[in-house]
Every structure is written in C-alpha cells, then in structure tokens.
Amino acid sequence: KIVLTRESLMNMKEDLISSEKISVDLETTGIDPFNCSIVGISFSNQPSKAWYIPVGHKYLNAPMQLSTDEIAPVLRSILENPDIKVCGHNIKFDFHILKKLGIKIKNIWFDTMVASYCLNPSRKSHSLKNLSIEYLNKSMATIETLIGKGKNQITMADVDINSAGKYSCQDADFTLQLACLFEPILVEKKIDKLFFDVEMPLIEVLADMEETGIKLDIEYLEKLSDEFKKEIESTESEIYQLAGENFNINSPKQLSYILFEKLKLPVIRKTKTGRSTDEDVLNVISQQHPLPSKLIRYRELQKLKSTYIDSLLNLVDRNTSRIHTSFNQTVTATGRLSSTEPNLQNIPIRTPEGKKIRRAFISEENCVLVSADYSQIDLRVLAHVSADEALKDAFFHNKDIHTSTACEIFGITPEKVTPELRRIAKTINFGIIYGMSSYGLAQELNIDQKQAQEYIDNYFKKYSGVRKWIDEILSFARKNGYVKTLLNRIRYLPEINSNNGQVRSFAERIAINTPIQGTSADIIKVAMINIYKKLNEEKLKTKMLLQVHDDLLFEVPEPEIEKVKKIIKKEMETAVNLSVPVLVDIKTGHNWRDME
DNA sequence: GCGATCACGC
DNA sequence: CACGAACGTGATCGCC
C-alpha cells in the first residue's frame, strides 16, 4: 500500500502500532548514509503485506507526497515504541538515516543480514536477494532494474513511486519473513545468545562510532602529501637513472623486465604469472645492485601517499574535519569486524614514515585520545582453551610471554634470552595461532626446515597442553565439520576431510586459528557493548571511535579522563571470564602516534 | 569488470 | 615436487 495522504498515514499507524514485530526498510538516494537523503520508507507487520511512504521522489510530475516533517511524529510513535520489535536487513544503515531525521529506533530486535552471518559467517553473500532465494524460495527484482547501472545510473528519487513502492514493500515483507524464519534456527543451533546478546546490541555501538568519526589534522596531512610527493619524484628519477630508461615502476611486469632481463639480477621467487618483485625479493637482490633499495623506498612512500594520505583527504568531512569509516559486521569468517572507506583498521604503525600518518589522527579541543589494547589476547585465549599449564603459569605470573617461550624451548633462564632468541620464540608463538608448519616457520625465520621442525618439536614438548588441544580441535572439526568460539560462534569447515592434502591442510589451519581469533573477537565485542552502556548510564561525553581487533580508541573530554580510563580497563578485562588473567594497556595522547 | 601483485594492519 | 602461515582492505596494473 502506498501512503500519500495524512489519512492513509493514520491508517498505517493504527495498523502498525499494535504489532509485536515489524520490519522497516528505507529507500535513499545512495548507499553512503552520511551522504544521501531519504526517498521513502516501508514497513511490514505480516507476510505479503507492507506499506510504503514516499517522501522524496523528485521526477517530473511526481505526485504530491507527505513531507519528512509530517511523517516524523508517526515514525517516532512506531519506531521509538519499546514494545514494538523492529527488524531490518542491514538495519545499521536505516538507523543512521532515521537518526538524521531525529528518530532513534528503540527496540532493534533483529537484523537478517547479521543473523545470516551468525548462521554461516563464510557465506559469500548475505544480501536479501540471496537469502530470499535460499530460505524463502522467492526471487527478487534487483535494484538495477529500477535505477540501472554504470554511468547512466539514476537514484531512487527518480524512480516512479509505484515501482519503488513495490520494490521497497517486498524488501520489508521478506525481511520480516526471514527474521521469523531465522529466529528458531538460531535457537536450535545455540547461537541465539551470541546473536541477541552480542551481535544485535553491537549494531548501535558501531553506528554511534561511525557517526562520531575521528578528527583529522588536514593541514598537517596536506603538508605530508607534498613532502612525500617531492621524495617520490626524486626517487623516481634515481630509479630511471639506474635503470637506464623510463618505465612504469608500479607495473610489476615492466619492473620485472628491468630487474631480471635488463639488469640480469637473479630471480628469487616466482609468482603465478611471472617473477616476484616483492620486498623480500628486493631485499635479497639489493646486495648486487643499488636499484632494489630505491624501489623499496619508492614503494613505501607511494603506498603511504596513495592509500593513506590522499584517500583520507578525499574522504574527510571538510566541515567538521572528521572522517567516518564504515564498520562491517558480516564480512570476516572468524567474527572480527572489518572497516572500509576508509579502512581505519590498517593505519600504519611500524615504520617511522608510516607513523607520520598516525600523527594526523587527533583529538578535539579539550579532549584526549585514549587507546586501550588487550595484551597478548590471542595467546591468553590459547592458554584458556588449551588449559596448558606452562602457558597459564606464564600469564599468572605476568611474564613476558615471548621471553618465557624462549626459556622453555631453548632451556635457558630469562637472563640468557637474547633479542634474537626472543624474536624466534615470538614467531613460533604467532605460528602456533596460525596453525604453523615447519615449512612456514622456516620461511618466516629464514632457517632450514629441519631446524624449524626441531623448534616446533621442542615447543610441543614443553607445551604439551597446546599439542593436546590442537589434536582435539582437529578431531572435533573432522567429526562435526565445524569449529566454534567461546561464545558459540561457528565456522563450517567443509574441506577438513578433503582428499587434497593442500586443501585439507588449509582447513586444519583454519580449525586451529578460528577458535582463537574468533574468541578474541567475541571478547572485544562484549567489552564494546558494556563500555557503551556504561558511558551512557553515567552520562559521560566520552566517545568510542575505533576498534582495531584488540584495540579500542576513545575521545575523552579532559575532566572525564581518570574515570573513563578506569571504566574502559575494567570492562575490557572482565568482559568474559577466562582461566587466565586478561590485561589491558591504556595510553593517552593528543594524537594517535604520540600516546603514553 | 576482474584477477593478480603488492603492501598496510592485527 | 610444490606448497606454505590466520583474518582483512585498497591501489594499481593489465587483460578481457
């Protein structure tokens, strides 16, 4: 039903207001919630029935429509009613748009995209179209049939109200049907707690973080861009000089010709299509010619400038100087979040040049940035799930875990652990989490495979609990075809019993890694929800800004610093109860680089 | 449009 | 004999 009049709007309200569950779906002029406007909104409260309220169709001779101001009070009476359970598909998007209209959905009950993700995080697509075919056996028209694609694409505002209404109503209708279908499946598979207590409450937390954004020092970034540009250009000339000709340095193919044919440097490694020119390779051949070092430098600067400096400047809001990422909750196979446009989860930190980028992320006047990161969360999770005595002991005595591992595998006292031995132990510790093999370790440490195997054998001799856990998780995976995390997040492993050794090995590494990485993801999600709740309850102005897997970043007004630091640390450390201590390091600073 | 390569994070 | 770290996003090239 299309709602064009006040009378019809009231009929809709009467109908919806007494519903237990409704679905909502917005049509907008785009997919960036901060850069689009509402075109229409649809609701459904029973199968095969839905309402569509057009408000922003702008084509020639479009009928008179209700305004957003006229419908807002009605939307509020429905969506802010705590007794009406609201569902949507990717409801974080609708939440953002409605919030801009001054409407805050009160009872976000169910997101079918997130539910699909919980049912099977490895699924290629969680789109409504895709789920409708699979679960409802109904195909849906794609949005392209309405707005076209490519450069001739129009927006929903240009689409005929009846066509748009039909489309939008079907979205709302199928969303509610799917929600009602999914709920008992979640219960039956015992992932209802994860879904209702973690993933659903997280939606509003993420929406708030996205909406807040983080402040950038634009002037500084522009200066940095110039600085990098100059050095890129001079390095470029040096490279052409050394190569004896101009070529496209960014083309691995053209670069291969220069390095391996013209300069006759040795081929270290091959790729599927040619000869590798990655940093490892360049490092090896830099002994024989000055060009490779220049290339490494060129690549570093080029990467930093194009991926970080320039793209951040393109995406920053010039009015507020803040940049708003989009956190995706349904992408990774392990339960981690991902971040796009821009990806703020891979801002450089390791090299001095890279760190210059971090300096551009700053706090608002009279605020500081607070970063709180879990100390060795993955290894603590491993200690918990494996119940390995040596590993647990190290954490109970708050030892440096890599030094402790070095002591165990080399049979020495802590004083005897050199930086080199600690590095080896650290690599092995990471390797364990990744389901390492002797080949992989050898590669990583630049040692021979036999030596690597000795390290591994030694590790498992000392950490027999870890060996036992790996055996158990692999046998569980082989028997059940899936693995799960502490909070019952599941990941299917259809290839765990494959006859292809390589395929099977890959599944085995996943079987080991996912319960660890996924449990860490569970833990930080619970912490985020609890911190968000606490900050609201205490009416604090502090804002959560970013999550980087084991790290949370906040913007904190100066008067709140001490109180908020305590809250953050406590909530993160007690989000779940592990059999080893969980520790969080807190730092503060006025930019994301200089924190202490 | 898409796969491959490379490089950034955890 | 080859493969060979787990999980992501993005810029760029070059083929189709």
Image (spheres, coloured by chain):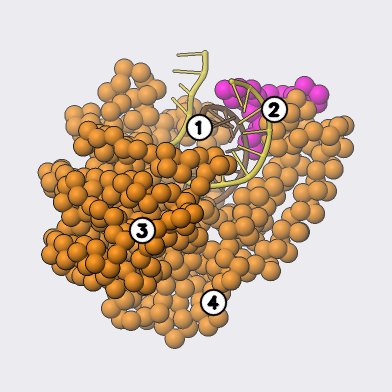
Chain colours: A orange, B brown, C yellow
Q: Are marks 2 and 1 on the same chain?
A: yes
Query: Pointer 4: what residue?
Result: A364
Q: Which residue is mark 3?
A: A54
Provide the residue designation for mark 2. A253
Mark whose residue sits in front, 2 or 1: 2
Q: Which residue lies most toward the front here?
A: A61
Given the image, what chain letter belongs to the residue carrying mark 3?
A
Point out the tag, 2 or 4, that comes first from the N-terminus: 2
Give the main secondary structure, helix, strand or loop, of the magenta stretch. loop
Looking at the rendered structure, the kind of residue marked 1 is: Ala
Q: How far apart, in angstroms, are the residues tagged by discs 1 and 3?
A: 63 Å
Residues marked 1 and 3 touching at CB (< 8 Å) = no
Same chain for the residues under marks 2 and 3 in the image: yes
Please tell me whether mark 2 sits on a helix, a strand or a loop.
helix
- Does A335 sit above or below residue A256? below
Q: CA distance from mark 2 to mark 1?
A: 29 Å
For the residue pair B6 and A350, the one nearer the viewer reads as B6
x and y percentages locating residue A226 in the rendered image: 76, 59
Q: Are marks 4 and 1 on the same chain?
A: yes
Instruction: Check if residue A268 falls in the magenta segment.
Output: yes
Q: Which mark is residue A442?
A: 1
Q: Nearer the viewer, mark 4 or mark 3?
A: 3
Name the spot of residue A191 as percent of width and height, x first.
19, 48
Question: Label 4 vs label 3: CA separation?
Answer: 39 Å
Confirm whether circles 1 and 3 share one chain.
yes
A550 left or right of A291 in image:
left
Span colored in magenta: A260-281
Q: Chain of mark 2?
A: A
